[in-house]
Image: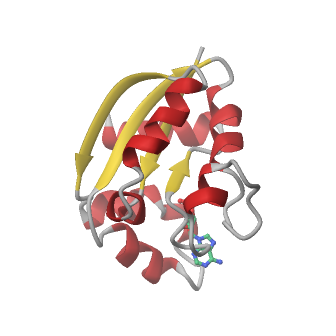
């Protein structure tokens, strides 16, 4: 069994697709171990996106993730990390396939509805930020 962190971003909450996104992950066999809705603190956002600190889109990304409430889920499944990233689709909604969460609901590369941890190490680090 593997655990991963899943975030429905402010655009997902704003566009009222929280229920549909959670329905999709439950249908794919993910167990929700913990879940909460909150506005991230600046410190949490900066910890989450620390690896993007030097990118040109960093300040805009931080502003976006702080712009509204997010839904945080601690999920468990076999091969959870790769399966969740498959369900989420590519980072850029324009490149994400139809039937993926980002392909169906994302609008821009930044406003791409969801975040899913990309490796075991990243998942452990990200889970610690929100579910210590
Ligand atoms: P996420 O999976 O949360 O990981 C980093 C986030 O940065 C990504 O989703 C997007 O929201 C954002 N992002 C990635 N690349 C770009 C880009 N080129 N321009 C703006 N935002 C980006």
The quadrant of the image that shows the C terminus is top left
Of the four image quadrants, the one with ligand 1 is: bottom right
Q: Nearer the viewer, residue 21 or 1?
A: 21
Write down the quadrant of residue 119 in the picture.
top right
Left or right relative to 21: residue 15? left
Write down the quadrant of residue 70 in the picture.
bottom left
Q: Nearer the viewer, residue 46 or 25?
A: 25
Query: Residue at position x 25%, y 46% from top?
Result: 37
Q: Nearer the viewer, residue 39 or 100?
A: 100
Query: Residue at position x 55%, y 82% from top?
Result: 57
Query: Residue at position x 43%, y 48% from top?
Result: 7
In the image as oriented, which residue stretches furthest toward the bottom?
A: 56
Q: Position of residue 56 (x, y in %)?
A: 58, 85
Query: Residue at position x 73%, y 59% from top?
Result: 96
Residue 128 visible somewhere in the drawing: yes
Residue 126 visible somewhere in the drawing: no
Write down the quadrant of residue 32 in the picture.
top left
């Amino acid at each position: 069994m593997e655990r991963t962190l899943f975030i429905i971003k402010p655009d997902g909450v704003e566009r009222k697709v929280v229920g549909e996104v959670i329905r999709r992950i439950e249908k794919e066999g993910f167990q929700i171990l913990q879940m909460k809705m909150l506005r991230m603190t600046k410190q949490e956002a900066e910890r989450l996106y620390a690896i993007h600190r030097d990118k040109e889109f960093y300040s805009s990304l931080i502003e976006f993730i702080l712009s509204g409430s997010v839904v945080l889920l601690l999920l468990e499944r076999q091969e959870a990390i790769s399966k969740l990233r498959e369900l989420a689709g590519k980072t850029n909604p324009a490149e994400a396939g139809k039937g993926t969460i980002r392909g169906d609901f994302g609008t821009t590369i930044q406003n791409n509805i969801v975040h899913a941890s990309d490796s075991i190490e990243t998942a452990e680090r990200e889970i610690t930020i929100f579910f210590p």
